[in-house]
Amino acid sequence: MTTPAVVFDVDGTLVDSERHGHRVAFNEAFAARGLPYVWDEAAYGELLAIPGGRARLRHFLVTQGHDPQQADELADALHRDKTARFRERCVAGGIPARPGVHELLDDLAAAGMTVAVATTGSRDWVAPLLERLFGPGRFTAVLTATEVARRKPAPDVYTTACAHLGRVPGEVVAVEDSAPGVAAAHAAGVTCLAVVNDYTRDDDVSGAALVVDGFRDATVWRGPSDLLVDAAVTAATLCALAR
Ligand code: XBP
Ligand code: MG
């Protein structure tokens, strides 16, 4: 068995980006356009069920009474502005990695394991964020919503990542945080570790082989608890998951 490649989700997995990052950028875009909308933390948590910031905006605008065509045009304009604002935060170092992610990436590198990224986020901010936090060229492949036809929970971003890595799905382990992400990995035939967070703790992640609540000082919510080493997710955890 070759050592598995590990494909990481971004939002909510590698980084804690939604509550104080994306959500704030969306609200700034609403205000810049003179719109009366403000997504509070609870409302945004509900809207996260819709993968993709533009689709999330369009859905919300229709619920606010905008007709479909107007909602389409406004969602385009707002998402462009939001993406520029969020990108600035990424470049300025305003989006932190989740605790334990740096240590896990170092452990995977020491074990000679290939790492990649598969996200619903937009390449415009994903590329600078990954470089700012983890250094250039840290990931062998980075697949974003920009490169695939269908967003998670469709398997496209994971099947494309496997192809870019030259791996069959059985040689890959996905690390995700949410229901759409776990569903996408499962649909692609990729074993999945779910590392839930305060927005996704009630998500249906039944497709995951192991569910924990963090990368360090972790508690196993479901799955073989002996796969954690000193309550931490390590290269050995991910290798064992792939078998
Ligand atoms: C999470 C998403 C993204 C972000 C917003 O992506 O659904 O849409 O919430 O980013 P993942 P955009 O968990 O797959 O990384 O506004 O660029 O879509
Ligand atoms: Mg995610």
Image: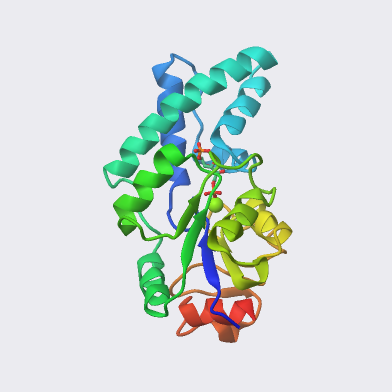
* Quarter of the figure with residue 240: bottom right
Q: Which image quadrant: the C terminus?
A: bottom right
Instruction: Establish if 198 lies above or below 122.
Output: below
Q: Which image quadrant: the N terminus?
A: bottom right
Write the residue at 49% across / 67% down. 214
Q: Is residue 31 visible to us here?
A: yes
Residue 111 is situated, as x and y percent measured from the top left of the image, at: 42, 80
Write the residue at 36% across / 31% down. 85
Residue 133 is situated, as x and y percent measured from the top left of the image, at: 32, 55
* Quarter of the figure with residue 222: bottom right
Instruction: Establish if 164 lies above or below 69.
Output: below
Write the residue at 32% across / 36% down. 88
Front one among 163 and 67: 163
Front one among 78 and 2: 2
Residue extending furthest left? 92
Residue 234 is situated, as x and y percent measured from the top left of the image, at: 46, 78
Q: Is residue 194 visible to us here?
A: no
Residue 229 is situated, as x and y percent measured from the top left of the image, at: 48, 84
Left or right position of 140 against 200: left
